[in-house]
Every structure is written in C-alpha cells, then in structure tokens.
Image: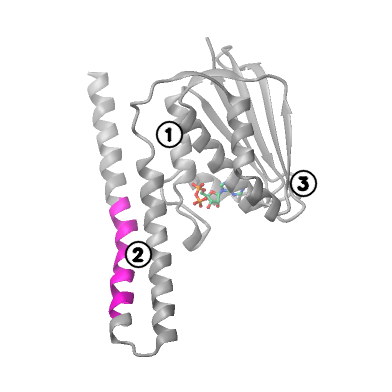
C-alpha cells in the first residue's frame, strides 16, 4: 500500500511537471510564431534579421528546457563505483573557459578520492549545475572552493563522503532560499531555466545523498555553501 501511495505521489508530481513544461515551452513557441509572421510581412532586411535573431533566442530556450528535463529519469544506466574527485576534476576542466572568462579561481581541497556507487553522467550534471550557478553568482576576482572528505553523518551516524561547494558570490535572500528547488524558479530571467537545482536534487535523491544549503547576502566573502553527503557501505 505504501508503494502504491509513493507511485501515486510520483505520478502527481510528473503530471504537474508536464503541465509546467508545456507552459514554459508554449510561451517561446508562440513568440516564434509571431516573429516568423513579422518576418513574412516586413520588407526591410535589417528588421527581418532582428526578428529572426529573436526567434533563434526563443528556440534556444526551448532546447535548453527539453535537454535539461529529458536528460534525467532514464534510470536505465546502471550504478557503478565512481570517484567524486574524478567527476569534479572533469567538470572543472569542462568549465575552465567559463571560469576564466568570469575571472574566478577554483580551489580544490580533496582529502579523499570520494569513492561512491552512482551514475557518472547524472552526477556530472549535478556539479555542472552547481558550479555554473556559483559562476553566475560571483563577481570577477571571486572564488569557488570544492572540499571533499570522508565523513560520518552526525544525525544518522552513517559513514560516507561529504562534498562541499563554497562560492564567494552574492548569496541568496530568504524568499529565494525557500523556492530554489522548485522547477522553473529562477531569478535570471530569460537566461535561466530554473531547472538546474530541481534536477540536481532529484539526482541526489536517487543516490541516497542529502543536500544542505547555507547562504548569506550579508557577508561579502561567503556567499553560498552547498553541502552534500553520500552514504557509503
Ligand atoms: P537557474 O540557474 O536556471 O536559475 P537553478 O534551479 O539552478 O536555475 O537555480 C535557481 C535559482 O537559485 C537561481 O536563479 C538563483 O537565484 C539561485 N541560486 C542557485 N545557486 C546559487 C548560488 N550559488 N548563489 C546565489 N544564488 C543561487
């Protein structure tokens, strides 16, 4: 009976999500339809190019939403032994260009390789999302620190690996903190999708990992800390 209830809850979530995805995709598609009409009826070439450019931007947004949502929930790939250190190293390399352009430094403080059982592609997605958010929040000269430790969870006394990601960014206000895991909640306007943290939380849940967030808008040197605990054994 409990399983059925969980299933029903999941279906309800998926239904609500499908409705909001449809809504989020419909708006840009409607805009594209209007822009294409404008292209059709406009003679001036520069003006037509401007409409086409806007249409392109709207379609980029649709693509972002679909790739972000469809990437997950294929639980088909098996979990295997992975090292969080390798995954994080890999993601930092992947984002090196963006970090450099933003004028940020990354400090790695790894006291363990962080062996856990998980899905590498999904975990990579989590760190891409978290580090991209940290970059968005930081000003040039800012800093991101990634810390990796073998640890014991205080409340459950379980052994595991703790990974924390600290940024020196703007931090979050209380109303943002209360909503940041909601799908489509974003403070970034057109450039955000509001799916990154929602998906990251889902992936962490699938790994039995817990996630805590501490954030302050008061202290210029400490923006936000995301702390994740992966139980092992
Ligand atoms: P998106 O990045 O597309 O907005 P997310 O789900 O990844 O979507 O994040 C939701 C919101 O949470 C962001 O718009 C931002 O306001 C806030 N946020 C997330 N990470 C950070 C961070 N490290 N520092 C400050 N704000 C953050």
Q: Is residue 25 magenta?
A: yes
Q: Is residue 185 magenta?
A: no
What number is the disc on residue 91? none
Q: Are marks 3 and 1 in contact (CB under 8 Å)?
A: no
- Residue at numbered disc 3: 221
What kind of secondary structure does the magenta stretch mostly adopt? helix
Magenta part of the chain:
20-37
Residue 100 in picture, x, y percent from top left: 70, 51
- Residue at numbered disc 1: 202
- The CA distance from mark 2 to mark 1 is 26 Å
What number is the disc on residue 28? 2
Q: Residues within 10 Å of mark 3 (few under 14, many from 20)?
A: some
Q: Nearer the viewer, mark 3 or mark 1?
A: 1
Q: Earlier in the sequence, mark 2 or mark 1?
A: 2
Q: Residues within 10 Å of mark 1 (few under 14, many from 20)?
A: some
Q: Earlier in the sequence, mark 3 or mark 1?
A: 1
């Amino acid at each position: 009976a409990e399983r059925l209830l969980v299933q029903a809850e999941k279906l309800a979530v998926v239904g609500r999500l499908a409705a909001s995805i449809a809504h989020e995709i419909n708006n840009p598609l409607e805009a594209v339809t209007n822009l294409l009409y404008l292209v059709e009826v406009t003679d001036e070439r520069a003006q037509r190019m401007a409409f086409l450019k806007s249409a392109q931007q709207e379609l980029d947004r649709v693509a972002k939403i679909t790739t972000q949502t469809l990437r997950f929930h294929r639980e088909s790939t098996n979990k295997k032994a992975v090292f969080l250190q390798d995954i994080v190293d890999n993601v930092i390399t992947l984002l090196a260009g963006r970090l450099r352009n933003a004028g940020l430094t990354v400090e790695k403080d790894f006291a363990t390789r962080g062996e856990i059982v998980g899905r590498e592609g999904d975990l990579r997605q989590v760190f891409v999302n978290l580090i991209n958010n940290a970059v968005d929040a930081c000003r040039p000269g800012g800093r991101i620190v990634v810390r990796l430790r073998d640890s014991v969870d205080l409340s459950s006394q379980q052994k595991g690996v703790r990974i924390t990601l600290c940024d020196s960014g703007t931090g979050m206000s209380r109303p943002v903190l209360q909503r940041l895991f909601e799908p489509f909640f974003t403070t970034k306007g057109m450039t955000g999708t509001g799916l990154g943290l929602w998906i990251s939380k889902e992936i962490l849940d699938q790994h039995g990992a817990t996630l805590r967030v501490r954030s302050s808008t008061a202290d210029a040197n400490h923006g936000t800390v995301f702390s994740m605990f992966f139980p092992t054994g």
